[in-house]
Image (cartoon, coloured by chain):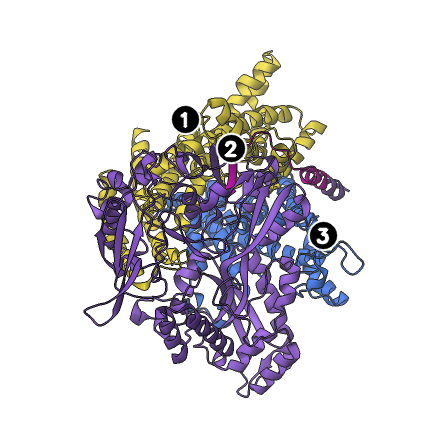
Chain colours: A blue, B purple, C yellow
Amino acid sequence: MLAVIAAAAFAGPLIGTALGIDPTAVDLTSRLAGPSPAHLLGTDELGRDVLLRLMEGGRISLAIGIAAALAAAVIGTTIGLVAGYLGAWTDRLLMRLTDAIIALPLLPLLIVLAALDLGKLGVPARIAQSDDVSLVRIIILAALIGWTTAARLVRGATLVTKNRDFVRAARSLGAGTPHILLRHILPNVMGPLIVATSLSVGDVILLESVLSFLGLGVQPPLASWGSMLSNAQDLIETGSQLAIYPGAMIFLTVIACNLLGDGLQRRLDRQR
Amino acid sequence: MMTDRLNRLFRLIFTAGLMAAAMPSGAAEHTSLTIGVTQYPGTLNPNIDPLAAKGYVLGFTLRPFTVFDPEWKLVCLLCTTVPSFDNGLAVPVDLPNGKRGVDVTYTIRPDAMWGDGVPVTTKDVEFTWKVGRDPKSPVSNAEMYRHMTGITIKDDKTFTIHDDKLDFTYAAINDFTLLPEHLEKAAFADPAQYRQKTLYVTDPTNPGLYNGPYRVGEASGGSYIVLERNPHWAGKPGPFDRITIRAIENTAALEANLLSGTVDMAAGEVGLPLDEGLAFEKRHGAAYDVVFKPGLIFEHVDFNLEVPAFQDRRLREAMLRAIDREGLCKSLFSGKQQPADTFLSPLDVGYTDDVPHYPYDPARAAALLDEAGWHMGPGGTRRNAAGEALSFTLMTTAGNHSRELVEQVLQSEWKKVGIDIKLKNEPPRVLFGETLLHRQFQLAMYAWISSPENVPREIFDSGEIPSAGNGYSGENLAGYKNPKMDELLKALELELDPQKRKAMWAEAQKIFAADLPFLPLYLRTDTFILPKWLGGVEPTGNQYPTSLWVTDWTVKK
Amino acid sequence: MTRFVTLRLVEIAGVLILMSFLIYALIGLMPGDPIDLMRGTDPHLSSADIARLKELYGVGQPLFGRYLAWARQAVIGNLGYSRLFAEPVLTALLPRLANSLALMGTSFVLAFAAALGLGIAAARRPGSVFDRTLNLLCFAGVSVPTFWLALVLILIFAARLGWFPASGIATPGNGGLDDRVWHLALPVLTLTLASVGSYTRYVRAAMREALGQDHIRTARAKGASERRVVWHHALRSALVPVVTVLALSFGSLVSGALVTETMFAYPGMGKLIFDAVMGNDYNLALAALLLATATTLAGNFAADLAYAWLDPRVSY
């Protein structure tokens, strides 16, 4: 199901071009129209095609979810591996860092991120000025706070794995630390990591919808399911279809992510 | 398929919620009223930290000396007569420094009393003036007090203010809200501590702090304020025994509260934005009186005139002609919000319609752009001879749904004439606190708050451009410089003859329409959602809240 | 063990001090000071007034110096005044903390109790229709955005049915406990629905693992009643991971309900922190954020302790 949603979302631009509809084209004469052959799911409050915007929104939501989850997994794995394998003071330090990150207040961090002038940080003007900046900010934020789960998980698994016979054997054969970490330990922690990552895709999508609710999410002209949903809460009575669709999409996608994680987990358990 | 089933389930849950009908209000007698607002007033001290929600609550509980009424006339609420040169209560004086000042005499209403039975006297006047003049005091609007160089007390009720500046607003002391000397004096012993020590904070339910028809009976931090009758109020009594003001910040939740009967009405001053008000009227208009009133919050798009391209007036006019403000107002705001052509409200005495108009005319806009050297290039974006693209960033406040919609409409319309617009929204505190203040923007959509016959010198005067040199003060964010405008506004302020002033206002609006330092959009309209049984609520269309006239409110049978 | 506890406490204190500076710096880095925000609301505020007020509030002094001054006062228990509420920080903070604890505590207990019952029932019949349905519902619960859930609940239970009030903490003038509980119903329901799903899944997973363990089989073989096996033997070992998860979510007790509080106009810590940060109320934001941080750290610490006590295999 997730694949269907993703495929539909990423096919959006193609369909749009094929039908000759621009998802950002504003048409004030046909606002909040019901479903019609031209607009299968009707139009929104600016007369834009709801179906296409849903696909666009899905692309953004999924992109944020997947990118942030992957980034978090990479950071978390690195830190977890190092902490778990080296142990002692490195471990303590990294785990306290993890604690600190978990306890870090989200909100001021977000506002500071939103206010940072990327141009000053040496980011090329072309990127700093582009529409996607608000998106990148959310991905960075979600990854920054999301890696702790992966780190704890990987650290735990590493602690167990590092004393297994095959790792000891490798070490006695003179394998270097990076080699052991990547070739022997990483494959063994991969399973739970994949499960956790697939779950966190859903979490990030929900996080984005909350940020949109607070007015700190994806900014126009981009739209995510979260921002579409939180905009629609004001129109809950006149344009309820605007609220139902993105709400349902978030719901289905998050469920799909969870089911995927759950399925993977089950398969993993069976293999053991 | 599961998807289908879930979808149906979701829809079912949803429709159940939608079928919510307005509950009939329980109480038949209507001896109390619950008002929903979207903001909780932080502190209740009238002279510290202005806030719209606070103004609304204090309207019930404190009488200002003078205010502008719904007809935009200056009236006395706490005084007996509005001073003027004709009635001799205002006398121009020549000051030693060669400038002209004015002495203005007011008399406090003889029946004015604080809620603890202590009469309102000139002692309170003198004390309030002292608080306002103290350099260490936290009073926000100290400008007014700086000009009040002295006060002469005649008796318990009559006093004369010596103002060192004679301008046409000489009679208005709207912000001079009295503090009860018998209670607040001790709190002001250390001016630097006054913010925290004031009884409005430490003991907000003390009846002696209020002199209006109502007093604060209960203040629950952040949630609600209960107002009770002021037993010592001598004027016409208000219609309710108790008025509860509930803060519900989320507007969708505020609507639900109206429907559930938890609140009876939504205040227009701090209530639903227009688009939600319109939607509410559509669904529930039969059960409520929904009143729309354009206010004095002026939405516009600022050009940063430091951007070279914007220095060409033709481009500015083209951008105004390229947007269909009429159509936008009609479709998004059901015509309840009218496009503006000048910076004054049509309700203002200085307003004139005799200015150049720039109706929607994309062909003319395109011609102007061609004329200015911006020719259509590949990809639908215009370029000049140097090959630069006609591309700008438009900024506004993130999270403001209505502005987000409008900016996307503008973007789409400008695109049609070959102007590429990128959108960049920032949280209000970032936008106002940093980006606009330091003028790091190209185009910015935001609003100004005005008042009746307010001379907008902070906005138009070339000396009010924020820069590192003046510590980033002033509101002239566009960087507008026109010596003629500077002088006209300076002279306008000092002109006492209303007829001459009218001509000057007309002149100023003409200069504005000719220069177009920013694109006027519209005056924001407030939505008042009132129960059918409530009458007499008359929105003023200026910043003075309806609550000041609560004694005119009635319960219909 | 004592050594472990002491060491962790020292570390927690270290992290807290570090965090206090970090939070201070973060708030300081945010653009826009309170005075700049004020000018948007008053057309008469002049440039001179703005300069004067900035001086008065001490805005514009170097960050580190301000931090040290704050820390010196904080250590002796003076957290300063809240700018938004013009009250001492604690006076503004404590009632909202109590509100938050009432809201979060109730829904925490309810969600946990429900999760325990449901999770155990599901674990005893793995793969049954009940188990599958419950699993799906759990996913559904965690997949709905909270603000959406809250709005639907308000529309159904407050606007349509009129069973519960749509907002607030109490009816003005009525401070009774029953009134408070009545007002708590919908926000608690929202939070409980939002969290019961993930708790149930943890309980179910832990319980299934426990039921498959050797000592359970031994107990069964010895002829212990099924009830005793489940509630005594299995639950005990299942509680280890569950308690850990609970302790970790402890941190959200203080500040985790921002969305719910906003939707129900419920004055709690989440909303307080949001307003303090947005309104640049330094002292208040700092105290509230530090409190939230401390609770989270304490939760993590409790999780470690629970691990150490309940599971003899873990040694420190």
Task: Determine the chain carrying the residue at label 2.
Answer: B
Secondary structure under badge 3? Answer: helix
Q: Residue at x 64, y 76 (%)?
A: B361
Question: How far from the left and from the top, in percent, is residue B475?
Answer: 39, 66
Secondary structure under badge 1? Answer: helix
- What is the C-alpha distance between the residues marked 3 and 2? 56 Å
Question: How far from the left and from the top, in percent, is residue A166?
Answer: 50, 44
Q: How many marks?
A: 3
The magenta segment: B9-37
Q: Tell me the crowding category of disc 2: few under 14, some 14 to 19, or many 20 or more residues within 10 angstroms, Cα based.
A: some
In the image, residue B478 above or below residue B309: above
- What is the C-alpha distance between the residues marked 3 and 1? 47 Å
Q: Determine which quarter of the picture holds residue B440.
A: bottom left
* Residue B32, numbered circle: 2
Q: Nearer the viewer, residue B327 or B64?
A: B64
List the residue tagged with mark 1. Answer: C309
Q: Residue at x 58, y 66 (%)?
A: B339
